[in-house]
Amino acid sequence: MNKLLFNPIRLKIMSSLINNSECDFNYLKKITESTQGNLSIQLKKLKEEKYINIKKKFINNYPKTSCSITEKGKIKFEEFFKNLITLKENGK
Amino acid sequence: MNSSRDQIEAIASVINNTRENLKPLSINFIFWGCLVIVMSLFNYAFPSLIASTQYSATLFWTVLPLIGMILTIYYNIKYRNKTGYETYLNRVIKIIWGVFNLSWIYIIALSFTLKSFHPVPPILFLLGMMLMITGLIIKFKPITLGGIFLTIFTFYLNFNPGINLLLVNIIGVSLGMLVPGLSLFYSKSYK
């Protein structure tokens, strides 16, 4: 199993990004029910592995971070999901 | 959250959190339907006022739609920022209508250059195509039918060049945009 996606917060981030073309930081914070600091760390880890892209811009002088999934991220998530299904079918 | 079942449930719960909300799309249709109808009616009722100077009609039919475009873009950006995410469907719709806006500018620019070229029939034809594509993508029959109606209507226009294009605008946009837009707005399956 992919260790990076085994973390619940990272798994929730990837699940949200696989379903949407783009998600904002605040939306991911709400979905993952995590703190700002923790979410930043998890996003950084996913970015380092090139699973996601992070885009930062300023709107009305406020920083806005939005994330999207990469092709590599999609492949890894699909592999992880297939493995989960196999495990579930095997009763684990 | 260690078992595979828990993880699948977590994935499903996150995915279910994203709702395909097509209400902003319906508001765009209603807004544009109303704007074009009001503009056409105004032009129909006060033709001398609209054609008072050499450029007044051109300005009327370019400046107001451009303001409308800016307003709808602003509304859509605001809505996107409020939700915090953009679905793939919304992205596709955004691209389709973005291309339509560019095509509209292209046709208007062409009509400025070629004096014998009237922009209404090609714009209505393009609008019909865009509506058909949008309706088919979101699987909403009234919008697809609106697009089909506009396409047939523009085909008919080519055989009746003397027809009043303001009335054409009113009929075409009412049945092609306003009615499907209202139908989408009140549709329960998209709420």
Image (spheres, rainbow, N blue to C red):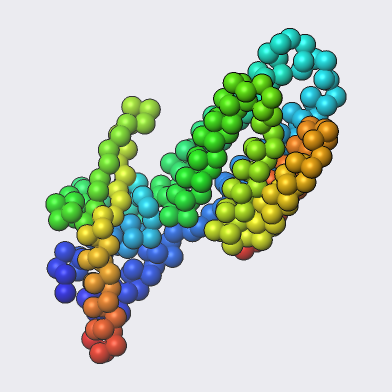
Q: Does the image show residue A45? A: no
Quarter of the view holding residue B43: top right
Relative placement, left or right, of B149 versus B88 is right
Q: Position of residue B75 (x, y in %)?
A: 53, 36
**Quadrant holding the C terminus of chain B:** bottom right
Residue in the image at 24% along x and 84% along y: A87
Query: Which residue in the rendered view is the most extreme toward the top?
Result: B53
In the rendered image, the vertical position of residue B72 relative to residue B114, given as above or below: below
Q: Is residue A26 left or right of residue B44?
A: left
Instruction: Give the residue drawn at x 21%, y 56%.
Output: A51
Residue at screen point 24% across, 72% down: A79
Q: Quadrant of the N terminus of chain B?
A: bottom left
Q: Nearer the viewer, residue B39 or B169?
A: B169
- Measuring from the top left, give residue B29's x and y in whole percent: 64, 44
Q: Is residue B115 left or right of residue A67?
A: right
Vertical comparison of A39 with B59: above or below: below
The answer to whether residue B160 of the structure is visible from this angle is: yes
Q: In front: B164, or B93?
A: B164
